[in-house]
Image: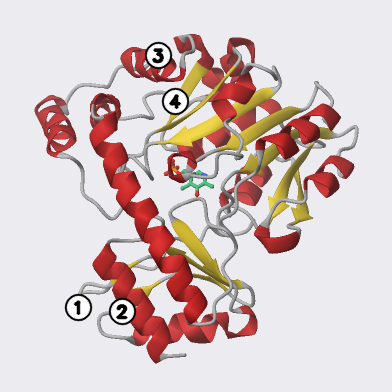
Amino acid sequence: MPRYVPGARGSAERLPPIKLSSNENPYPPLPSVAQAIGAQGQLAHLYPDMFAVELHERIGAFLGLPAASVAVGGGSVAALQHVLQAYAGPGDEVIFAWRSFEAYPILTQITGATPVQVPLGQDGRHDLDAMAGAITDATRVIVLCSPNNPTGPALRSAEVEAFLARVPSRVLVGLDEAYVEFVRDPDVVDGRAALDRHRNLLIARTFSKAYGLAGLRVGYVAGDPELIAPVRSCVTPFSVSAPAQAAAIASLDAQDELLERVELVVAERERVVPALAELGWDVPEPQGNFVWLAAGERTAQIAGALADLEPAVLVRPFAGEGMRVSIGTPEQNDALLAALGSIR
Ligand SMILES: *Cc1c(COP(=O)(O)O)cnc(C)c1O
């Protein structure tokens, strides 16, 4: 089993690091959301609503779907795990792009199924042609990641439609849209709209990134109720805590305010990419809250040099390939650019 490598953290002896290693939202919860979380402290001796009824309804309403179309989990990683548990097992194949989100091989192997990793094509993009070509009689699930973690580009609607036309209806396709709120390219696939056209499609979304609730663990998958029912059967009972349920609901109430913050991150992304280009980095088109620096053989060396600075600049290196760097506050991004300039 591959190990999940979390983004680097700081240590007690040093200045607080500039943590750009986990694609977290750089802004703390809104006061209204923090208050909803705090109120749950008084009720911590009680189990949460096991079926998270209100949260399912609120997410359903947000998506324009019935509550039965939604299955929440302790982060969308957990929701995706429940999808794979429901639909794949020993002897089955699960196709996904590689390099992509490092949880996919782990979640696949937990079910006993065989991961089929299809190398990315040009510019850190999925090679959907090769992925369609990898389908066999044993294929049960295909996971698409848009925007792709860690390389950044998102899938376009037309290419996804052409791909889905080649996927047999007995194969489940999971579209992981963890960063959908940061997408600004109008040609990028909208998983919610695609659900209406494809009954074998599920989308996965999270409150961890745009909504800034990574520490609370809440995400979901959505699709046809018939597809979702077996997923719900696999959910660990009570896995979304009461504070997480309350925070997610308060966040849906505060949509507009939260999306203003997303806008700040997107504006920073648009500022950082040309600045990186000036430093000589050719960044694949980022549609999430992170950029990919293809440092190749020098990845570990550069990430090490950034971590040795005071304060440390923490990124997520993939040795021999490149590093994923989250977009932070303007100050954090300035520090990143200065650091990259200094170790040029
Ligand atoms: C961050 C991320 C998730 C979701 O993480 P959770 O915190 O478990 O909701 C899912 N998929 C990708 C590609 C991610 O980068």
Asked whether the residues under the numbered discs 2 and 3 touch, taking CB atoms below 8 Å apart as contact, a structural biologist would say: no
Residue 342 visible somewhere in the drawing = yes
The disc at residue 61 is 3
Nearer-N-terminus badge (4/2): 4
* Residue at point 68%, 62% (across, down): 123
Which dot, 3 or 4, sits closer to the camera? 3
Nearer-N-terminus badge (3/1): 1
Quarter of the image where one finds residue 49: top left
What type is the residue that disc 1 sits on?
A: Leu
Residue 24 visible somewhere in the drawing = no
Q: Which residue is mark 4?
A: 72
Which dot, 2 or 3, sits closer to the camera? 3
Nearer-N-terminus badge (4/1): 1
Q: Say what secondary structure mark 4 lies in.
A: strand
Quarter of the image where one finds residue 193: top right
Q: Which residue is mark 2?
A: 312
Q: Say what secondary structure mark 1 lies in.
A: loop
What type is the residue that disc 3 sits on?
A: Ala
Q: Say what secondary structure mark 2 lies in.
A: loop
Mark 1 nearby-residue class (10 Å; few <14, some 14–19, many ≥20): few
| Vertical comparison of 227 with 187: above or below | above
Mark-to-mark CA distance, 4 and 1? 37 Å
